[in-house]
Each structure stands twice: as structure tokens, then as C-alpha cells.
Amino acid sequence: MYASTKSVSSGSAVTVAIDLAKDVFELAFGNADFRIVERKRLSRAAFAGCLSNRAPLDVVMEACGSAHHWARVFVRVGHRVRLLPAQYARAYVHRNKTDRADAAGLLEAARCGAIRPVPIKSALQQGTQGLHRVREFHKAQRTAAINLARGLLREFGIAIPLGAAKVRPAVLAALEAADNELPMALRHALAAVLDEIQSCEKAMAAIEQALTEIARNDIRCLRLMQAGGVGLLTATAMSAGLGDLARFPSGRHLASALGLTPRAYSSGNTRKLGRIGKQGDVYVRTLLIHGARSNLLQAALRRKRGQPLDRTQQWALALAEKKGHNKAAVALANKTARRLWAAEHHGASFNPDHVSRRSAA
């Protein structure tokens, strides 16, 4: 349907900016000065082989849906690919948003050296992320089914205890009891809901087993799981979503990429820090914070029992007493991310008792 080609000006193309889509792809070819010399608007079938017979180009795309797939395709045929964060490339689009304007904006954004490209994910990394997405889907389905059972039984005066593990025994007891007002048709429907909950739990367990096999063969995951509050889910999600942590210039850059650093509102001599930025991968940040909560609760339990604490746990508990549990959990997640970066950067094992020492200038 779409296979138009239009030359705009003379010059040899060395860069191509591609506005990705489901069916129609817009391409803008730029010369050494990043001036557009050619445009193409292609259908999906034509786009698949559009760069196969061309000299090596610098391919620029937004890091959006299907971008990593096309990046791997273009790398295999000899092109150099850069994936730019969509939120930064958007600032270079002038006036109205169109496919042509998006492609031209990407070409302009390619000139900015301050924009760090997104690493191209391998098929295994995307597959691991896909497993996490499917597990979250089953978890949401299980939660919805549990809430449905709770709500329906509450209408008949039957209260289900808190905790997902207590739902099935309590619902089965209510279905088998003859002294409640549950209609027989609803009993059969709730039995089907219980089967749905069990099916979701089996699917989640199967995915966790697959993630265990992936982590067993991934050295990076094994290193990440040495840290307190970092388990199977967090380690595999970080390894697949972030890749090599040492690619970040510092631990603060990693924490900032995860949205764990405070927003800055500064001008002149006035410097104000607000809440955390909440940018980057929401899923990984959530896992890190949940892991920090678990680590903090474990530290409190160890202190109550009189068991020894490491330096990180002592620091977290002192901060919790001063700032509260929630802020301490986020701060501990921030510290964990920074220390994970340091362990990757220096090729060392995670040490909760490590003390940073700056060399004298």
C-alpha cells in the first residue's frame, strides 16, 4: 500500500531515522550534516528488507515497541543502531506531531551527544521480561478472582481472613457448609472461581521455575542475588531490563535511571530536593522497594531477637526511627542499587558491611 520514495536534496545519506509503527513506517535519510536528503514511507512488508542492500548506515529509532527486534535485524545486516529514549527524542519534534515530523525529530536528536542510547536487548532478555509480564498478568487475574470471592461471600455474612493462602480453605468451607444462605447456583460458580485461582497459581509457579533456570545460567543474576532484599524476581528483572550495570557512569546514575533519586528544584543558590523521580522501569523499582521493605522488617526482627546486624541494617533501622518506615525503605532501595552498581563495576561480591573510603587528593 505504502512504498513511496522522495528525494529532498542532494548528498549521500549516512544516517536514517525511523519512526516505527505497526503497519506504516516513515524513514528520513540524513547526510553528514544531518540534513534530510531522502524520505520513504513504507508498508511493513516493504520495510522488512528496505535496508538489506544499502551501505552501512547509522540507524536511529525510538526505544519503543518492537524497536529492539528491528535493531537486531539491522545489526545482523551490518548497520549501526542507536535507540534513543522516547521522552528525550520527543523534545526535538517541531509543531504538529506527524510521522514525517517524528522522523525528522529523531534525526535532529541523533546530533545530541548528551542523550545516552538505550542498549539493544537480546532475544533472551526480552523473553525474560516477557515471562515477568505474563506472571504479572496471572497475579492480577488471581487477585481479581480472590476479591470477587471475598465480595460475594461478604454479601451473605461470610468473612474471608486476610492472606491469599487462606482464601481457598475458607471458601471451600463456606461452600460445603449447609447452615449458610448461599444458593446452589452460586456455590457452583464460586467453585469455578477457586479453580481459576488455582490455575493462576500453577501458572505463576511454572514461570518462577523457568526464571530459576534462567538465573542459574546467568552469572549476573547470581551476583545480584547476593544482596539483601534481592531475590529471583528482582535479579532476573534487573538483568533483563538493565543489562550490564557497569555501563552506568556511577551508582547515582543507576539509581536515577530507576527513579529512586529525589527530584531537584534548584536555581541560583537555592537548592530544593523533592520526592523521588519515579522515572525508568516501574516494575524493577517496585521490586527493589518491596525487597528493601522485607530487608528492613527482617532487620527489625533480628534486633528484637538480639541477633547481630550488618552495617546496612543498622543504618536502615536508624533511618526508619528518624524518617519513618516508608522513607527508610526507599532509601534502602536506593543504597542497594548503588552498591549493586559498585559490585558490578569493581567485579566484587556484594558486601553489606562495606565502608566507602575516598582516596586523599
Image (tube, rainbow, N blue to C red):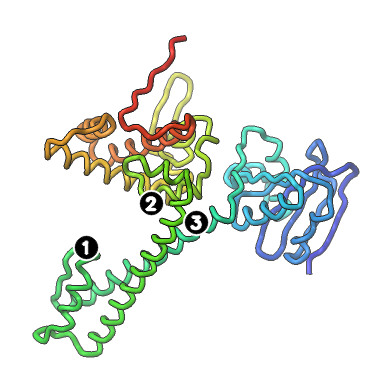
- Name the residue rendered at 30%, 81% in the picture: 192
Q: Residue at x 47, y 60 (%)?
A: 131
* Picture coordinates of residue 275, whole percent (x, y): 37, 37
Q: CA distance from mark 2 to mark 3?
A: 12 Å
Q: Which residue is mark 2?
A: 232
The three-letter amino acid code for the residue at tag 2 is Leu
Left or right for 125, reference 275: right
Q: Position of residue 174 (x, y in %)?
A: 16, 79
Q: Position of residue 361 (x, y in %)?
A: 47, 9
Q: Quadrant of the N terminus?
A: bottom right
- Identity of the residue furthest to the right in this view: 10
Image vertical order of residue 13 relative to residue 350, above or below: below
* Residue count near mark 1 (Cα–Cα under 10 Å), binned few <14, some 14–19, many ≥20: few
As helix, strand or loop, the secondary structure at mark 1 comes to loop
Q: How far apart are the alpha carbons under marks 1 and 2?
A: 22 Å
Residue 316 disc label: none
Q: Which residue is denoted by mark 1 in the rendering?
A: 163
Q: Residue furthest bottom?
A: 184
Q: Looking at the image, is mark 1 or mark 3 earlier in the sequence?
A: 3
Tell whether label 2 touches label 1 (CB within 8 Å): no
Most extreme residue toward the top is 361
Amino acid found under the numbered disc labelled 1: Gly
- Return the disc, 1 or 2, that comes first in the chain's sequence: 1
The residue drawn where x is 23% and y is 65% is 165
Q: Residues within 10 Å of mark 3 (few under 14, many from 20)?
A: many
**Residue 15 image point, x, y percent:** 77, 43
Q: Secondary structure at mark 2?
A: helix
